Image (spheres, helix red, strand yellow):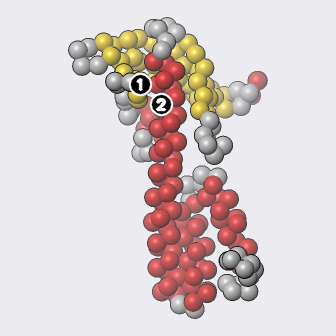
């Protein structure tokens, strides 16, 4: 760790050896990742300074920052997934079926499935479609498909997700 590779001499063995594990947990998308990062960094700071107050302050600050980063990242991933579904369904006629998929820059949370346009809803305010889409897990005989319904509406240049209700179960409060 550090610029000159101080190893575990400056902070001690545990913080230096636990940090890579915490980083992997953070990248894996674990919901407890911010709390794990807070415990690790707070413990390391408290051990390095000999002050529990400093360790507590660093832990609280780390938890806040990690929560913000985690929620922002997952919100962006979910929006990209919703946009991929809406873009695929937007060009289809009523009754049209197609495959959809999203591949993120970091290959975590890549999803795919099928979708079908159920009906078109045109009004003077917006042109919308109701769709059913699946999120597939596995392949071949082990394929598991969970189905959801939602509405998409055409904005000036693209089709966008229009309903929060179907997203609540799948994405929680992070729509």
For the C terminus, the image quarter is top left
Could you say which quadrant of the image residue 150 lies in? Answer: top left
Marks 1 and 2: CB-CB under 8 Å?
yes
* Residue at x 71%, y 31% (from the top left corner): 138
* Residue at x 45%, y 58% (from the top left corner): 68
Could you say which quadrant of the image residue 35 lies in? Answer: bottom right
Is the residue marked by circle 2 packed among few (<14), some (14-19), or many (20+) residues within 10 Å? some
> Image height check: is 169 above or below 56?
above
Residue 13 appears in the rendering: no
Q: Which residue is mark 1?
A: 158
* Residue at x 51%, y 75% (from the top left corner): 59
CA gap, disc 1 to disc 2?
9 Å
Q: Could you say where residue 56 lies in the image, as x and y percent from the top left?
A: 49, 80
Number of the front mark, 1 or 2 = 1
Give the side of residue 34 with respect to residue 15, left or right: left
Q: Residue furthest left?
A: 124
Q: Which disc is residue 22 wearing?
A: none
């Amino acid at each position: 760790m550090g610029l000159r590779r101080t190893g575990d001499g400056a902070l001690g063995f545990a913080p230096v050896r636990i940090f890579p594990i915490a980083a992997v947990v953070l990248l894996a998308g674990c919901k407890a990742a911010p709390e794990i990062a807070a415990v690790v960094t707070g413990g390391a700071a408290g051990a390095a300074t000999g002050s529990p107050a400093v360790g507590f302050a660093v832990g609280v600050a780390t938890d806040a920052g990690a929560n913000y980063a985690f929620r922002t990242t997952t919100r962006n991933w979910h929006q990209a997934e919703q946009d991929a579904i809406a873009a695929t369904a937007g060009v289809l006629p009523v009754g049209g079926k197609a495959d959809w998929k999203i591949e993120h820059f970091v290959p975590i949370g890549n999803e795919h499935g099928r979708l079908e346009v159920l009906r078109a809803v045109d009004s003077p305010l917006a042109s919308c479609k109701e769709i059913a889409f699946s999120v597939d897990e596995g392949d071949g005989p082990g394929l598991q498909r969970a189905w959801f319904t939602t509405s998409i509406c055409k904005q000036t240049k693209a089709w966008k997700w229009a309903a929060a209700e179907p997203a609540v179960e799948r994405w929680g409060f992070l729509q």
